[in-house]
Amino acid sequence: MVTEMDFGNMLGDSFAYAKDAVVGKWMQWLLLVIATILLCLPLLGYILKVYRGEKPAPEVNDWGTLFVDGIKLLIVGLIYAIPFLIVLFVTIGAGIVALASDPVSMMGAIGGMLFGFIVLVIIGILTMIFSTIGVIRFARTGSIGEAFNFSEITATIAKIGWVPYIIALVVLMVVMVVVEIIISLIAMIPILGFIIQIVLIAPVMLFEARYLCQVYDAAGAA
């Protein structure tokens, strides 16, 4: 079991990986922007190549494969999202029905919705914990079924160490929140902000994917 991770080194490696993929390689960056504009499907396919552990960042080519892989990755993500979406719709639907049928019991309806949202948070956290490893297993094996092989996913997390693994995810979440805040502020600039936002999507996703690869590969070093 891994007892500690050098998060600073992992973040630095991820930043360098994303930077080297686009800075000075303007045609590749342009292709990644085009992949982003095309409903992000080719970009998702490209990220799947990153999840496979390719280093340095792979070339942007074979668009047909990128589209297909992007659709597969999207399907995996949607399947993982099903429990969350079911609880979300039930919670919102129950709250609306309760308020419409008996406005006097508004406090009870609000309480029920709050409980539902707590359940949503729990489901969201569990989904993130298992889907992160599941998606990379899918990328490494080429089998969609392996994305939901929970016994192997649990075994991989155990090799990394549950505490180091969860801390690694929290570190990434904090960094991504900061990045999203910065990008949101940039997006407020008329016209130019939107363009910059589109241009930065791919490098940010590359950074995140490379970081998660390092977390996953820590199981192999355990």
Image: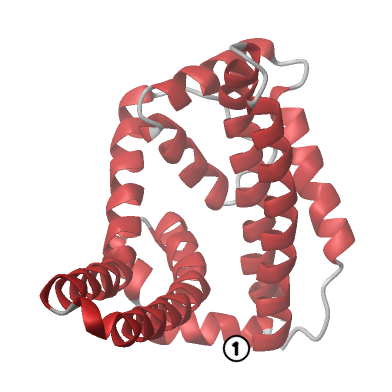
Q: Position of residue 163 (x, y in %)?
A: 70, 86
Residue depicted at x 35% and y 57%: 77
At label 1, which amino acid type do we have?
Answer: Ala
Q: Is residue 72 visible?
A: yes
Q: Quadrant of residue 107?
A: bottom left
Residue 218 to residue 185: above or below: below
Considering the image in quadrants, where does the N terminus appear?
bottom right
* Quadrant (top left, top right, bottom left, bottom right) of the C terminus: bottom right
Q: Which picture quadrant has residue 143?
A: bottom left
* Outermost residue, left side: 101
In the figure, is residue 157 to the left or right of 164?
Answer: left
What percent of the width, then of the height, locates residue 145?
Answer: 28, 68
Relative image position of residue 4 (x, y in whole percent): 83, 80
Residue at image point 29% right, 61% down: 144
Q: What residue occupies the far front of the structure in this picture?
A: 104
Q: How is the image coloured?
A: secondary structure
- Viewer-closest of 206 and 201: 201
Mark 1: few/some/many CA within 10 Å (<14, 14-19, 20+)? some
Q: Secondary structure at mark 1?
A: helix
Quarter of the rendering containing residue 173: bottom right
Q: Which residue is mark 1?
A: 158
Viewer-proximal residue among 178 and 215: 178
Viewer-proximal residue, 53 or 195? Answer: 195
Identified at 64% across, 19% down, the residue is: 193
Q: Can you say whether 76 is above or below 163 in the image?
A: above
113 w.r.t. 135: above or below: below
* Residue drawn at (70%, 33%) of the image: 185
- Left or right, 179 with reference to 88: right
